[in-house]
Image (spheres, helix red, strand yellow):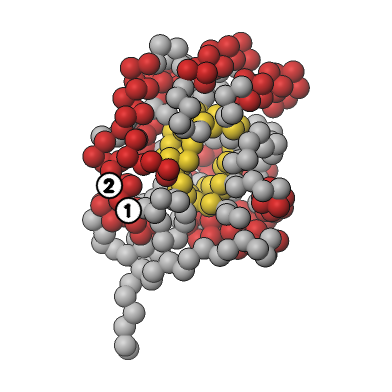
Amino acid sequence: MRLHVGCAMWTHPSWQGRFLPHPLPPGERLRAYAGWCNAVEGNTTFYATPSRSTVETWARQTAPDFRFVVKLPRPITHELRLDGAGEGLRAFLDAIEPLGPRAHALWVQLPGSFGPADLGTLAGFLRRLPREHRYAVEVRHRAFFEDPRCERDLERALGGAGAEWVPFDTTMFFRTRPSSDAERDAWTKKPRVPRRSAALTDRPIVRYLGRDDTAETIEGWRYWAGKTAEWLREGRAPTFFVHTPDNAEALTLARRFHDEVRSLVPGLEPLPEPEPAEPPTLF
């Protein structure tokens, strides 16, 4: 029984010296993060396919059971919209190969304009992908959440490839007006869609956006703590990512979520204790 938790990144200015040692060379930052969380979103690959040597450093800094949910590059998903992306996809798959089992799922995040009329393209794209990887798809078109027929059609397309549907739950965030600069920025950028929690596979993945107020963030994930506990009892192996607009406390919040689920499922093993940000002193 294993629950993986993590954040949208493995380094953040506000974590340095508080949670993670500072200064740290780039080749040690992921290792320090992996002492706190056992999963991370691979958002950087959306902006550029990394070099194979860079990915090799990621693998060296993490244990084989650490989970990367690695986002496909923007040219594949947003510019080509999955059509004619063979060359870019091959380059991406070659680059991430050193991750081995750490590449928990390849994440296909689609733009809000990718709707029900595009499902044939998605189904064909998924069918052509190599079977050695798992795949997870995030959609943002409201029809998939509000029209039962469109929802069933998407589930059918995903099921044909054994792919998971990744929900990005922003319902807590949009419950009240923003109260900080980071929240106001997120207000204009994050998707506003209904919550979805049906798992299609044995490895569901959830992205959750809270608030900069930690109490509100914790209150908003109560539903997910119960759902995650349910999945664990069913024999599933979920991954849960905690976001807040400024992400200043996301690292500790991810661990807090793991602790809350563990209180509901006592058989769940605790996360290892992270190393202190600063070495202990005698005085």
Can you tell which mark lies on residue 61?
Answer: 1
Can you tell which mark lies on residue 57?
Answer: 2
Q: Position of residue 251 (x, y in %)?
A: 47, 57
* Left or right: 276, with 182 as reference point: left
**Nearer-the-camera pick, 118 or 269:** 269
Q: Position of residue 227 (x, y in %)?
A: 70, 48
Residue sitting at x 23%, y 39%? 53
**Nearer-the-camera pick, 119 or 65:** 65
**Quarter assignment of residue 89:** top left
Give how far apart the Cα atoms at labels 1 and 2 are: 6 Å
Q: Position of residue 30 (x, y in %)?
A: 34, 53
Query: Are dots 1 and 2 in contact, CB under 8 Å?
Result: yes
Q: Is residue 144 visible?
A: no
**Nearer-the-camera pick, 76 or 243:** 76
**Quarter assignment of residue 190:** top right
Give the residue type that dot 1 points to.
Answer: Gln
Is 143 placed above or below 39 here? Answer: above
Residue sitting at x 68%, y 18%? 153
